[in-house]
Amino acid sequence: GNSVTQMEGPVTLSEEAFLTINCTYTATGYPSLFWYVQYPGEGLQLLLKATKADDKGSNKGFEATYRKETTSFHLEKGSVQVSDSAVYFCALSASANTGNQFYFGTGTSLTVIP
Amino acid sequence: DTGVSQDPRHKITKRGQNVTFRCDPISEHNRLYWYRQTLGQGPEFLTYFQNEAQLEKSRLLSDRFSAERPKGSFSTLEIQRTEQGDSAMYLCASSLAGAGVEQYFGPGTRLTVT
């Protein structure tokens, strides 16, 4: 089946610290992988995506590389800011499913302190 | 780009009552999805439409739930005889058809069943 396992939080970091949020997946077929972010009081927003193995998605200083050999899509940022405080969700869309519905991890809450 | 909108944003109802939620997708998107999100969890797929056709329903979608997308534009999700376990955030998303395509999420409708 399809599932996403995400690093449990909450995570608290000081400003300018390095961030890694782990995400691993199981999937039928060849999935596309996504990171979504949910800021307080707002809806889910796409942060980045990768659609095939070895692709790197990047946006706003965040990066994640699609690693087929380790079935992982870890999110990284070199220097976090207070404004990055949010909940981060890893998700996959499996091509074997005609509807391409998403399977989400449980989310990781990040708090960045000044 | 007006984004995905949902109405109402909040709904409080008594157990046993019926409720209906509305979702207006991004106008050029032919796919529309409904998800449910409970506290501390990621969104879980409920159902999706391609144009006006409902093509897949999750096992989470009990007989008390029904969704429609009558003209391939907006969609409604109705819950009959609500139960306390129905309390959750109901999310709508839309996308173009195709593998690896991102979904755009609305702000959600928070349902509280008392």
Image (cartoon, rainbow, N blue to C red):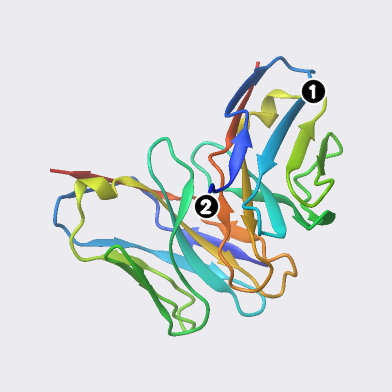
Kind of residue at badge 2: Asp
* First-in-chain label (1 vs 2): 2
Label 2: state its secondary structure.
loop
Q: Is residue A108 above or below residue A18?
A: above
Query: Which numbered disc covers residue B83?
Result: none
Q: Residue at x 59, y 41 (%)?
A: B5
Q: Which residue is mark 2?
A: B1
Answer with left or right where residue A105 lies relative to residue B76: left
Query: x, y (%) of residue A32?
Result: 56, 73
Q: Chain of mark 1?
A: B
Foreground tag (1 vs 2): 2
Q: Quadrant of residue B53?
A: bottom right
Q: Residue at x 79, y 23 (%)?
A: B18
Give the Cα distance between marks 1 and 2.
Answer: 32 Å
Label 1 sits on what residue type?
Asn
For the N terminus of chain A, the quadrant is bottom right
Q: Is residue A108 above or below residue B13?
A: below
Where, by quadrant of the figure, is residue B97 drawn? bottom right
Q: Residue A7 location, x and y as percent?
A: 40, 57
Q: Position of residue B69 (x, y in %)?
A: 80, 46
Residue of label 1: B18
Picture residue at 28% right of the left edge, 50% below the top: A84
CB under 8 Å between discs 1 and 2: no
